[in-house]
């Protein structure tokens, strides 16, 4: 073909595809509708979408290895050793099947007769969306001894699928590489840790699949690229062990279920520990259902019924005088539930609550049968569980009696705490609560704030480490009660789950933790975040929790003056204003704590919505957060020291 012929072929080619292109234009017009948002989250979602297709191929039994690469030019590659997306000519569509998959919305599973598509990202939008939101994309398929290729710009094919090479016949697979479009995304730089965390989770959820993550932007000392391999032979069993790695086990066994009931594949791993936490992580088609749903309800129902029946049948409750509640059965329980549903209905605020009713019975039956067998075959472990349940019930009842003698108000239901300086507006969506370390900083914050929409709650003294205390014990702590009462959050209203927080009366939609920028401050941040994570995770999930960022320095050179929030910012100030780019002539005032700023400075640097920097606390990966919080705040100091040494952001600030 001459250059001219090629151009005209490409032109004719794209002209015949107007219909398709319009479909993808919709994705570019409203990207958030398809991938959630256009920030960091949506950017990473593109990768998950592509990886999910390879996971599907693996679940169908044809793929064992997925390689993900992050490149210096901002692109991502995902390569698998599956059968390769079919490339044959599609009669109805008048083009290659591969092109249809890549350019038609929701065309993902079209050619997949028989086996149903089980994975698929949160929005399940398919690879064509990724293509539409990429400035460039290249797909390569190895099948039948040939390498096929097609490239795209913003989802538009640049040429029909063509053969670009040969390969051994037995070598098959799909390679996708995409460059996220900077015109669409507000950020385009990938975070290794975010991708690693999801790949680790996927490896645990899908035993036997090897996922390699390589960061071609970063070299190790020996010249190789930064790389991790995620592989789990034991799947969910290893996953619960990982989550509970810093907790003391009640016994070493993992109760493991892997079965299919009423056409629903159900996999569950359960472990008991000596803590007071309930940590149940549930997944549907590899998606973390943080709002729960019918599968979780089925699990809880089976657990309560089976344990209760076992304890009664074995006369273990005869001498127990207290009523045992559902929660008591779940104290110290860590579990991962993973099910596959052909047509999941996702509901709830974040579309992570499973609505399919038929699933409840399937999970209930699977867990009921397996747990009954386990208890009968393991009397020693069964006794440990029942004893722990009874203890939980007794402690709960004793605490309630003690509370009732002191005051009659339900937990978290009372008036506002005396230390709270409330704001005058009442609309929660406009109101902010600053939780401030120390009375003196609290005083400055009260003077410096805009009292219309900013409320201040100063905290004095130590904040309870809820990781180590029984659930109800937290409500005996003044600081915890002050926070809960100020927020207007109530507990104990939900029949199903009496520990669930009720956010209906939440009084502020921004809750801002404001502490000193030093080790103590960061410790207090962690304590408060632990309280929220364990008692009110919904509040983090809904994006209400923030951390304030006070400046580290005030740099001055003549008339130029700037607050610097990082060492890099201070460096930049010196480069720009210092004599000959040196520190000469620059005065640096270092802020050791919030208390060193006067009310005006505190407002200007840390509280004024126009100028402040707020960090939103996000729950990227609940299972991993569970593991990290239990490690940081739990009993075992070894792993904690290691983690702090590896992640010591504040180490040089204090030096
Ligand atoms: C449908 C049919 C066949 C393969 C695939 C889909 C497939 C899709 C993706 C997406 C990423 N990697 C993939 N690998 C395979 C094969 C049908 C056949 O060979 O008979």
Image (spheres, helix red, strand yellow):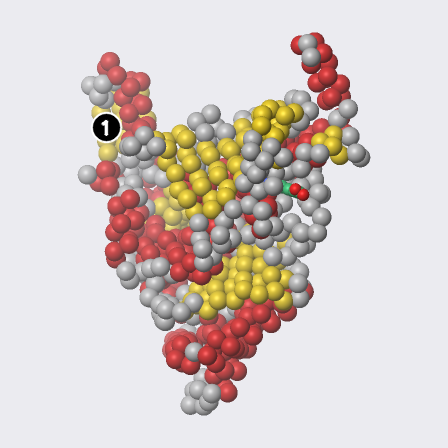
* In the rendered image, the vertical position of residue 139 relative to residue 506, given as above or below: above
| Label 1 crowd bin: few (<14), some (14–19), many (20+), radius 10 Å | some
* In the rendered image, the vertical position of residue 488 relative to residue 17, given as above or below: below
Q: Nearer the viewer, residue 322 or 624?
A: 624
* In the rendered image, the vertical position of residue 456 relative to residue 325, given as above or below: above
Identity of the residue drawn at 57% across and 63% down: 266
Looking at the rendering, in which quadrant would you find the C terminus?
top left
In screen coordinates, is 273 left or right of 115? Answer: left
Query: Is disc 1 placed on a helix, strand or loop?
Result: strand
Q: Residue furthest right?
A: 92
Residue 249: percent from the left, percent from the top? 35, 68
Residue 159: percent from the left, percent from the top? 67, 22
Q: Quadrant of ligand 1?
A: top right
Looking at the rendering, in which quadrant would you find the N terminus?
top right
Identity of the residue drawn at 27% across and 49% down: 642
Q: Residue furthest front?
A: 169
Q: Nearer the viewer, residue 134 or 145?
A: 145
Q: Nearer the viewer, residue 556 or 262?
A: 262
Residue 534: percent from the left, percent from the top? 42, 59
Identity of the residue drawn at 33% across and 66% down: 248
Residue highlighted by disc 1: 588
């Amino acid at each position: 073909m001459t250059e001219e012929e090629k151009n005209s072929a490409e032109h004719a080619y794209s002209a015949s595809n107007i219909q398709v292109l319009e479909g993808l234009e919709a994705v570019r017009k409203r990207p958030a509708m398809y991938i959630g948002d256009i920030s960091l989250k949506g950017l990473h979602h593109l990768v998950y979408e592509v990886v999910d297709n390879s996971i599907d191929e693996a679940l169908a039994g044809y793929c064992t290895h997925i390689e993900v690469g992050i490149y210096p030019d901002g692109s991502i590659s995902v390569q698998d050793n599956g059968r390769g997306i079919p490339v044959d000519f599609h009669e109805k569509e008048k083009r290659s099947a591969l092109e249809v998959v890549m350019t038609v919305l929701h065309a993902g599973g079209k050619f997949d007769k028989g086996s149903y598509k089980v994975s698929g990202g949160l929005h399940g939008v398919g690879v064509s969306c990724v293509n539409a939101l990429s400035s460039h994309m290249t797909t390569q398929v190895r099948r039948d001894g040939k390498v096929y290729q097609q490239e795209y710009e913003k989802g538009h094919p640049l040429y029909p699928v063509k053969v670009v090479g040969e390969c051994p016949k037995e070598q098959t697979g799909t390679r996708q590489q995409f460059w996220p479009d900077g015109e669409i995304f507000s950020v385009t730089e990938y975070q290794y840790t975010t991708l690693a965390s999801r790949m680790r989770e996927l490896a645990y959820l899908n035993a036997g699949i090897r996922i390699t993550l390589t960061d071609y932007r970063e070299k190790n000392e020996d010249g190789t690229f930064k790389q991790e391999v995620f592989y789990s032979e034991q799947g969910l069993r290893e996953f619960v062990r990982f989550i509970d790695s810093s907790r003391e086990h009640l016994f070493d066994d993992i109760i493991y279920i892997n079965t299919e009931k009423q056409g629903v594949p159900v996999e569950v791993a359960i472990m008991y520990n000596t803590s007071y936490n309930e940590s149940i992580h549930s997944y549907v088609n590899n998606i973390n259902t943080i709002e729960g749903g019918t599968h979780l309800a089925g699990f809880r129902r089976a657990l309560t019924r089976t344990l209760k029946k076992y304890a009664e049948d074995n006369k273990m409750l005869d001498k127990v005088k207290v009523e045992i509640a559902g929660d008591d059965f779940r104290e110290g329980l860590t579990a991962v539930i993973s099910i596959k549903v052909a047509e999941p209905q996702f509901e709830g605020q974040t579309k992570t609550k499973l609505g399919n009713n038929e699933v409840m019975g399937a999970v209930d039956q699977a867990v009921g049968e397996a747990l009954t067998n386990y208890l009968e075959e393991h009397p020693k472990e069964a006794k440990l569980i029942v004893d722990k349940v009874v203890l939980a019930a007794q402690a709960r009842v004793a605490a309630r009696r003690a509370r009732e003698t002191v005051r009659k108000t339900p937990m978290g239901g009372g008036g506002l705490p005396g230390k709270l300086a409330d704001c005058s507006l009442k609309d929660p969506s406009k109101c902010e609560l600053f939780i401030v370390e120390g009375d003196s900083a609290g005083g400055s914050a009260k003077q410096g704030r805009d009292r219309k929409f900013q409320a201040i709650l100063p905290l004095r003294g130590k904040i309870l480490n809820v990781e180590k205390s029984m659930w109800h014990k937290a409500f005996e702590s003044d600081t915890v009660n002050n926070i809960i009462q100020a927020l207007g959050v109530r507990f104990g209203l939900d029949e199903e789950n009496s520990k669930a927080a009720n956010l209906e009366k939440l009084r502020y939609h921004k809750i801002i933790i404001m502490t000193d920028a030093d080790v103590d401050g960061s410790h207090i941040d962690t304590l408060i975040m632990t309280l929220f994570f364990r008692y009110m995770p919904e509040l983090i999930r809904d994006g209400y929790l923030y951390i304030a960022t006070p400046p580290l320095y005030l740099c001055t050179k003549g008339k130029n003056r700037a607050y610097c929030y990082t060492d890099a910012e201070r460096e930049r100030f010196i480069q720009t204003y210092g004599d000959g780019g040196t520190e000469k002539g620059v005065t640096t005032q270092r802020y050791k704590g919030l208390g060193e700023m006067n009310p005006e400075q505190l407002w200007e640097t840390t509280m004024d919505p126009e100028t402040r920097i707020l960090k939103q606390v996000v729950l990227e990966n609940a299972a991993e957060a569970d593991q990290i919080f239990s490690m940081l705040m739990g009993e075992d100091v070894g792993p904690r020291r290691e983690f702090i040494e590896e992640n010591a952001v504040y180490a040089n600030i204090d030096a």
